[in-house]
Every structure is written in C-alpha cells, then in structure tokens.
Image: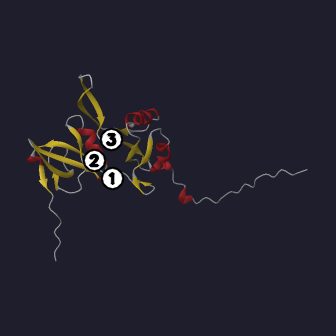
Amino acid sequence: MSQSSTPEVRTAEINPLLMISSDRQPKAWYAVYTGSRHEKRVQEHFRSRQMESFLPLYRMVNRWKNGCLANVEFPLFPNYLFVQMARHERVRVLEVPGVIAIVGKGREPAPLQECEINALRLNLQTQRFEPHSYLAVGEKVRVRSGPLAGLQGVLVRKSNGLRFVLSLDLIQQSVAVDIAAQDLEPIAPNYLPH
C-alpha cells in the first residue's frame, strides 16, 4: 500500500517595499505590433476589454477593379496601433487576438512620448495626415505656432509647398502633414566648442 504524499506548502517572507499596489503604476502609451491588416480588429478587442487604445486612420479614395470610387479608411501606421496601459498590464495586452508584440527594447515595452500621441489625437480630424516613408536624416525643424506647436520633425519639400514629417522613432514610422513655412523654425545643431 502506497502512502499519498501531500505537497509541502511554503510561505515566503513578503518584503513590504515590494507590496506597492500595481494600481498606482502610471499609465503610458505603448505601440502594439499587430498581424497584417488586423489593426481594426485588435482595436475592437481592446474596446470590448475596456482598454484605451488609439488607431489613427486616414481616408483615401480607392478605385476598385470594377471602376467604382470609394472613400476607404486605412491605418496611418500599418501594423501598429497604440494602447494606454500600466506596465503590469502587458500580459493582458499580449493576450488580445491579433497582437504580436508590444514595441520596446528587448523584453521591456518602451513608452511613447505622450505629446506625440496627443498631437496625433487632437489634430487628426483637422489636419490632413497621410503615411510617409520613415526618414532617418533631414532638416530638423520645430513647429513654433499652430496646433502642432512644440513638436519636432523633418521638413520635406513637396511640389506645391512644405510638409512637416513627424517620426515616431520607436516604431520607425512617420506621418506627413502640410504646414506653412511661417509656422516652422529650424533647430540649430548643438554647438560644441573645440
């Protein structure tokens, strides 16, 4: 006859400094990488789980194969959307169907600049944004007036005017918006004495 053994239960000492409530962790915006063409579905999952998310969209006139024209909304940053979360909620985000990863450095998610997300959220309805290829080099400028004041980006010339390109370095994506030259000022390179 064999004896059944009960597992030994051990209690660990709890360090009171480690018991800070996870509810007090500040929330920040993080970029979420999704499967191809799953951005809208992932946003619906976030909405149903009552998680704040932001999927910037732009409209484009699309011509279908049958010749019909239609206004279609596309993600401004293909394969990406943004979620506001505390760091301890990352597992909850990764459990959402269609989410591949939270963008970060190594295994740690990296928060985005809140001013960049706020600028996109506030101005998406009033300004015409469209995707732009990511620029690593170019003339750096700062917006000195208008709704995008304070943001830094790259100045790009377009045949009929100027465009301001806002780059989100963490996800290596950029967006371009038409802007008047008088709203921009160059960012002087830091002068280092010899």
**Which disc is residue 116 wearing?**
2
Packing grade of label 3 (10 A; few <14, some 14-19, many >=20) is: some
Picture quarter with the C terminus:
bottom left
Distance of mark 2 from mark 1, alpha carbons? Answer: 12 Å
Instruction: Kindly indicate whether the residue at mark 1 contacts the one at mark 2 (C-beta within 8 angstroms).
Output: no
Q: Which residue is mark 1?
A: 170
Q: Quadrant of residue 190 in the image?
A: bottom left
Secondary structure at badge 1 equals helix
Residue type pointed to by label 2: Glu
User: Mark 3 or mark 1, which is nearer the start of the sequence?
Assistant: 3
Q: Nearer the viewer, residue 19 or 53?
A: 53
Secondary structure at badge 3 equals loop
Secondary structure at badge 2 equals helix
Residue type pointed to by label 3: Pro
Q: Is residue 33 above or below residue 50?
A: below
Packing grade of label 1 (10 A; few <14, some 14-19, many >=20) is: some
Packing grade of label 2 (10 A; few <14, some 14-19, many >=20) is: some
Q: Is residue 67 above or below residue 80?
A: above
**Which disc is residue 78 wearing?**
3
Task: Give the residue displayed 51% in from the left and 54% down from the top.
Answer: 20
Task: Give the residue displayed 45% in from the left and 50% down from the top.
Answer: 87
Residue 120 location (% of width, % of height): 26, 42
Query: What residue occupies the far front of the structure in this picture?
Result: 65
Distance of mark 1 from mark 3, alpha carbons? Answer: 14 Å
Distance of mark 3 from mark 2, alpha carbons? Answer: 17 Å
